[in-house]
Image (cartoon, helix red, strand yellow):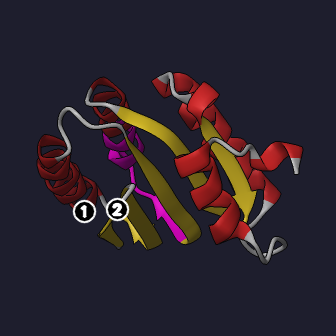
Amino acid sequence: MYRIDRENWGITITFSENLTLEEAQRYNEEVGAIRVQLAGKSWGVLCDCRNLGVMMPGAQELLTKSQEDGKKAGMGRTCVILAAPIPIMYAKRFAKSSGIYAWERYLNGRSNPDWKLQAVDWITKGIDPDTR
């Protein structure tokens, strides 16, 4: 499952439970339409994956393509919120394969009570949460 919310600085994406291939396809269509609306602007993404389960076969590839398309469409800094070290490791590998690792940070949403503030500060002001 997923939810996309518009913010004044970009979008917040919340993934929860398992992500099916069909949901990933719908997500790509929806986020693609938002990218068109944001064309010509710099925008960021907060991706809340604290409750993400398993990505079904093919879903991760579609999300990688979505990240690549976002980068081409003006996506700036992004921050991924996860709930444990192993998913953080997977997310870093995912970002490296899509070419946005330099602009993406990862926060543990379970052990860091200020995750949302730190994420938005990274996205909007470039304040690196890794140096706090």
Label 2, residues with CA under 10 Å away: few <14, some 14-19, many ≥20: few
Q: In which quarter of the image is residue 58?
A: top left
Q: In which quarter of the image is residue 7?
A: bottom left
Q: Position of residue 16 (x, y in %)?
A: 46, 74
Q: Earlier in the sequence, mark 2 or mark 1?
A: 2
Q: Name the residue under label 2.
A: 8
Q: Residue at x 25, y 30 (%)?
A: 73
Report the side of 48 relative to 74 (left or right): right
Give the quarter of the figure containing the N terminus: bottom left
Horizontal side, residue 93 vs residue 52: left or right:
right
Residue 63 belongs to the span the image colors magenta: yes
Left or right of 19? Residue 110 is: right
Q: Look at the picture and state if 106 lies above or below 48.
A: above
Residue extent of the magenta highlight: 52-64
Q: What element carries label 2?
A: loop
| Mark identifier at residue 23 | 1
Identify the amino acid type marked 2: Asn
Is 72 located above or below residue 17 in the figure? above
Residue found at x 49% / y 58%: 47
Report how far apart the C-alphas of labels 2 and 1 lie in the structure. 25 Å
